Image (cartoon, rainbow, N blue to C red):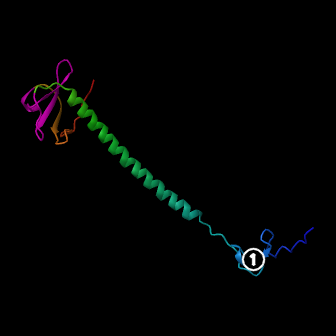
Amino acid sequence: MTKKKPDQVVYNEEKGRYDASLTPYATNLGAPAIITEDITTWKNANISKVNHQFKTEYEELKAKYDSMMEQFEYNNLIYSAKFSFEPIVGAIYHLYRSKMGEPFLSLIAPEECTWDFAGTFELKADKIWNRLDNPEINEE
């Protein structure tokens, strides 16, 4: 049976030596007290900041996604519309609905006709249609 050392003595039985100087904590009564800092306030303030940052990034991404989906719907609508000419990049075109509700593309401005106007668009160099007016397209 091994002789038990007093509590204030730091003896490493695995290594067979005294190693009080190697411990990351105080080992005698004369050592300074270990006081843990209260970091709750720091954590809460930073959690709030980080959550705000993530929320802002999420809202920006959501707005960009919504804009991209709206542009996708416009492009899908225009590319499925009837037209018998090859659109020129940079030119402005107007989208209308026929009496049957089918979309068609035209060079004629809304002020020059009485057709059911759906929107004004411009064809960009990347072949994506850019909407130039703000009214909503009422797809049925």
Image quarter (top left, top right, bottom left or bottom right) of the N terminus: bottom right
Above or below, 25 relative to 135: below
Would residue 29 be seen by someone viewing this image from the given angle?
A: yes
Element class at badge 1: helix
Q: Mark 1 = which residue? A: 20
Q: Position of residue 62 (x, y in %)?
A: 37, 44
Q: Position of residue 113 (x, y in %)?
A: 8, 27
Tell whether position 88 is magenta: yes
Above or below, 134 relative to 1: above
Is 11 left or right of 57, judged from the image as shown?
A: right
Residue 73 sits in quarter: top left
Picture residue at 71% right of the left edge, 73% below the top: 23
**Amino acid type indicated by mark 1:** Ala
Picture residue at 10% right of the left edge, 39% below the top: 91
- Residue furthest to the front in view is 15
- Write down the region rendered in magenta: 85-113
Picture residue at 40% right of the left edge, 52% below the top: 56
- Residue furthest to the right in view is 1
Looking at the picture, tell me which residue is in the foreground, 107 or 86: 86
Looking at the picture, tell me which residue is in the foreground, 126 or 98: 126
Would residue 136 be seen by someone viewing this image from the given angle?
A: no
* Mark 1 Cα shell of 10 Å, populated few (<14), some (14-19), many (≥20): some
Looking at the picture, tell me which residue is in the foreground, 45 or 128: 128
Q: Position of residue 20 (x, y in %)?
A: 75, 77
- Residue furthest to the bottom in view is 30
Image quarter (top left, top right, bottom left or bottom right) of the C terminus: top left
